[in-house]
Amino acid sequence: MSIECKEFGYWQGYRCHLVTLKNKSGLSAAFTDFGAAVQSLCVPDKDGKLADVVLGYDTLDEYVKGDYCHGATIGRYANRIGGAKFTLNGKEYKLAENDNGNSLHGGGFGYNKRLWTIEELSDGDEPAVTFGLTSPDGEEHFPGTVKLKVTFTLLENGLHIRYNAVSDKDTILNLTNHSYFNLKGEGEGDIKDHIVKINAAKYTPVDGELIPTGVMAYVTGTAFDFQSPKPVRTDMDNGRLPDGYDHNFVLGEGKQMRTAAVVTEPVSGRVMTVRTDKPAIQLYIGIGLKGETGKGGHKYDKYAGLCLESQYCPDSPNKPQFGSCVLKAGEEYCFTTSYTFSIADD
């Protein structure tokens, strides 16, 4: 039931901030306007002990220099666009190639590397902060000036994220949050024993560059079947998918709020439930982490955290069978995702 806003350093002459929300349940979360990022999220374990369950950094300079999008708001298009190009209304748009000839997470200057404005602070039983950003027409070669807002609300039992946007031209838009979760606590080893359930009967197979082939395949009988809960490591250890997951799961039609995933950490007893009205979700288990130093001097090695990123399917601009990610001029983009926490039954 409190809000604290303090200076977090300077970037290119602009003052950045760290906003900390606390509620009566004892939960707390901190956010920085650099990248509209979740900097910390502290929730209790089965014994009531609080721990920060998201990876991140202690300083602004580390967020500026970091390559892993810790906790950040991602756009203009989260995930990958194959060939770094797409066609809209008969015109081809060539994007920055920042991932093996493809476009990833909005290009070289995505929203995770932008200074957002603090639009609103709201106190009360569910304190909240709203960040705003104007993305001009032609930025990273995307059409349309887009005015965006992302609101983080600290619920009694977790975090709710609402994305709003409007464009003055037809464009594509796909926003998500890139928090890495470790329910043992950030820096407390890997997440391979986290038990994951994903409510998806289909996933989108990818080529060697992680671009979807265009097929929506059934997960049954594959390493991608999380319809029944299983440890992350199961199909890594048995050799079916040795490196692990950076894959998209199909949830269904957008605009319908649903439980997308449930993650359980057996030792702490923490359970995280992910709900969203986006049509898909990406499971990424930190394959690219390489021992960087994070909060408290902790080393974030490979598999130090997992992401569950609500989204449109990757490469949707080039795969009409995946559904439209087009935001029409003047129409409102509005999606929500929540990460709530509970304790596993004994």
Image: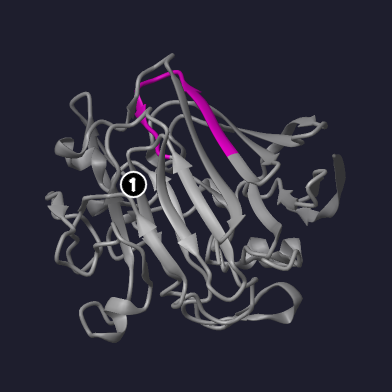
Please state, as top left, top right, bottom left or bottom right, where the N terminus lies in the image.
Answer: top right
Q: What percent of the width, then of the height, locates residue 43? A: 70, 58
Q: Along the horizontal axis of the image, is 149 left or right of 199?
A: right
**What's the residue at 53%, 27% (across, down)?**
164
Tally the numbered discs: 1
- Front-most of residues 266 and 27: 266
**What's the residue at 18%, 26% (across, down)?**
90
Q: Which residues are magenta?
A: 161-174
Q: Along the horizontal axis of the image, is 11 left or right of 229?
A: right
Q: What percent of the width, then of the height, locates residue 248? A: 30, 54
**What's the residue at 80%, 48% (across, down)?**
20
Q: How is the image coloured?
A: one colour
Whether 176 is drawn above or below 284: the answer is: above
- Front-most of residues 272 and 88: 272
Q: Which residue is mark 1?
A: 95
Q: What percent of the width, then of the height, locates residue 17? A: 80, 48
**What's the residue at 66%, 62% (across, down)?**
63
How busy is the neighbourhood of tag 1: few (under 14 within 10 Å), some, or many (20 plus)?
many
